[in-house]
Image (tube, grey):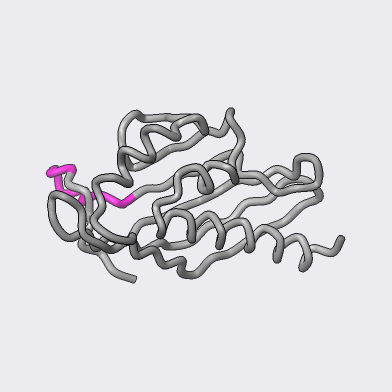
Amino acid sequence: MSNKTEEAAIRAVIEDWASALRTKDAARMTSHGVAEMVHYSMAPPLVSDGTGLNALQTWFDTWQGPIGYELRDLAITVGDDVAFCHGLNHMTGTQTIGETDVWFRRTMGFRKIDGRWKIVHSHESVPFYMDGSDKAAVDLKP
C-alpha cells in the first residue's frame, strides 16, 4: 500500500477513536489500542497502560453530555509497520466540577499488527508556567 493509503487508514483510526471519546464509548475507544499500550496521560498515574477501560469509563461519567473534541494541525508520519502523529487537541464540555475548555498536545504511536493500525503509545500534555509556580498553562490557545 502507498503511504497515502496508510495515512488515510491511520487518520480513520484517529477519527473513530476521537468519535468514541466524544460519545463517551470507552470500549470502542480502547479497541483501537493494544493491551500493552503505554499512555502518558494528563491524569495520574505517571504512566498507564491500554487496559484502563474502567478508569476511562469512570472519567467519562464525570461529563454531562457529549465531550467536545477537536483535532488541529494533525501531522502523520508513516513507515512500513510503524507510524506516529502529533497535533493540538481542544476539549470542551461540562463536567461535574464545571466547564472544561482546554487545549493540549497529543502524540500517538502506531504499529501495524495483523494488517491493522493499532495505538501502541499515547502522550498528552499541557505546558506549565516556568515562573516558579509550576501551574499548568491551561489558558493557552493556538
Q: Position of residue 106 (x, y in %)?
A: 45, 53
Q: Nearer the viewer, residue 129 or 85?
A: 85
Answer above or below: position of 142 versus 126: below
Q: Position of residue 100 (x, y in %)?
A: 22, 59
Instruction: Give the left or right position of residue 130, taking residue 79 as reference.
Output: left
Q: Position of residue 12 (x, y in %)?
A: 64, 62
Q: Nearer the viewer, residue 39 or 95?
A: 95
Q: Nearer the viewer, residue 82 or 11?
A: 11
The answer to which image quadrant residue 45 occupies is top left
- Secondary structure mainly formed by the magenta segment: loop
* Rendered-image quadrant of the N terminus: bottom right
Residue at position x 35%, y 57% in the image? 104
Range of residues picked out in magenta: 126-134
Residue at position x 53%, y 54% in the image? 17
Instruction: Give the left or right position of residue 39, taking residue 114 as reference.
Output: left
Instruction: Give the left or right position of residue 120, taking residue 131 as reference.
Output: right
